[in-house]
Amino acid sequence: MLPLFTLGAHALLVGSLLAPSPDSDGLPNAWRPLAGQILLSSREPDARLVDALRQLAGGEPAHLIVIGTHEGFEASPHGLRPLSLGTLLRLTHQDQAAIGLLLLEAPADASDSTRLRKVLAAVLDRGGVVAAAGSAIEALGADGLGLLPNAEIGSGSGGQPSRTNRFRIGLGDDASLLLRGRRGDILSGEVEIAVGEGPGRPVRRERLAAGHPFDWIAWSRAAAWRSRDRFTPIEPRPARVDAGALVIVGGGLTDEIAEEFITLAGGADETRLVIVPTAIGEPAASRSGHDRSFRGRATEIRVVHANGPDDPRWSELIEALAWGNALWFTGGRQWRLVDAYAGTEAEQQMHALLARGGVIGGSSAGASIQAQYLVRGNPLGNREMMSEGYERGFGFLPGVAIDQHFTQRNRLADLESVKQRYPELIGLGIDERTAIIVQGSTLRVVGAHRVAVYAETDPETGARPTFLEAGQRYDLVERAVVQDG
């Protein structure tokens, strides 16, 4: 039995395969969370599913509509009425009531398929629910309507996606799955998620049951990157900053660290500071007050935030990055920075700011994002160190992985696991109220506590850190403490 939800939204039950939509071969940041919800069931359409549809659509006020016929299923006893695609498309734009649509047959020609896609998009854009049952679940994937870019949807386990830039969602017997935003929740039965092998990576499968959600955008990103290259080169670029400076804080910005940051940018009168609060997430990122730590320290400050290139604030962000000589990332969750800026003009402008001698800083999530390898990138929680699809930081400091709140949250073993998987990387664990300042290949420790450097891995004892105190320096290329004198 499908669990029922009460949602003031639209619902749509799709029951037939349509002509394929164009493939999505874009880079990972091409995907955005669903505005609405998608419901998938491995059963054929039945009364239980229609009851769930009615509940999802908000109950009796909803429009319940059927297109086509399906053997063994009678629409009229369920209160479903026929409606043409043209009328339905107008309804989605003109009527604010919820809509429940049961599609039992595919449109006969390509123009009708195009109109159906517009209907589905309109329903989802209004926060609605699109559902498919039985063999028709395939219609919502990359070979059908393409509502989930790079996803192939079907029944059963053990299958692999047909292309390396896709992943597969396989529903077991009597399984049901609800996709909302970026999250997939198994409502009943089991669901298998799989991505094909890529350079340096074997086929990956996860069989999930209720209580074990997954992030479909992360799987999309993982599939796309597997089709391109091995994530970490065998010999990464040397860990050095060729121009400018980095200020990387383990959490908690102190006056001392803030003053160091502004000094590196040229002092109060010369600093053109750009603050990016995107990692905090909405609605907090769009509120004021993110400049409080730098008020009185820099005379020119711009706080800019955009959720990707489609955001109306995007041009303001790009202009500010071109204007600034100092960039600061607030704390929050680093995956939000990846979703908004990775692979875009904004990331290019950030690198350009550093290349022209600017300074880039950040705390917590704003620290980890500066590394080549991104830890704790899983959008569903921050405990997983290596989350495929979210392993690429912005790479201001190549050849490293950076963790924060290090000693305070007892994260030593976590960074050791990354070093064991990727021995070519240098692991940096930074305590709260502590920062590293990187110029060239030298880092200098500032603040109240310590920094752990995981530079080498012993086959017998594993990765063991070198701990640095405030004032100490470390050469990241030589992988050695810089001795005074």
Image (cartoon, helix red, strand yellow):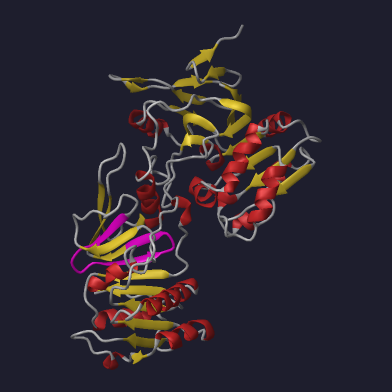
Tell me if residue 349 can be seen: yes
Left or right of 360 on screen, residue 173: left
Residue 250, position as x, y percentages in the image = 55, 34
Residue 386, by quadrant, is top left
Residue 331, horizontal then vertical, whole percent: 57, 44
Q: Residue at x 40, y 44 (%)?
A: 383
Indicate whether 191 appears above or below 328: below
Q: Nearer the viewer, residue 326 or 195?
A: 195
In this image, 166 relative to 317: left or right?
left
Q: Count the marks.
A: 0
Q: Provide residue 362's location: percent of width, then percent of height.
A: 60, 38
Between 379 and 104, the one nearer to me in the picture? 104
Q: Find out whether residue 251 is within the magenta segment.
A: no
**Rendered location of residue 63, percent (x, y):** 41, 87
Towards the viewer: 435 or 324 = 324
Residue at position x 38%, y 53% from top? 220
The span picked out in magenta is 167-185
Check residue 181 for magenta coloring.
yes
In which quadrant is the C terminus drawn? Answer: top right
Q: Is residue 321 left or right of residue 410?
A: right
Position of residue 396 relative to residue 312, above or below, is above
Identify the image quadrant of the N terminus.
bottom left
Whether residue 54 appears in this view of the structure is: no
Residue beneath the point at 21% across and 73% down? 43
Q: Main secondary structure of the magenta part?
A: strand
**Image vertical order of residue 462 relative to residue 11, above or below:** above
In this view, the residue in front, 184 or 232, is 232
Residue, far top? 485
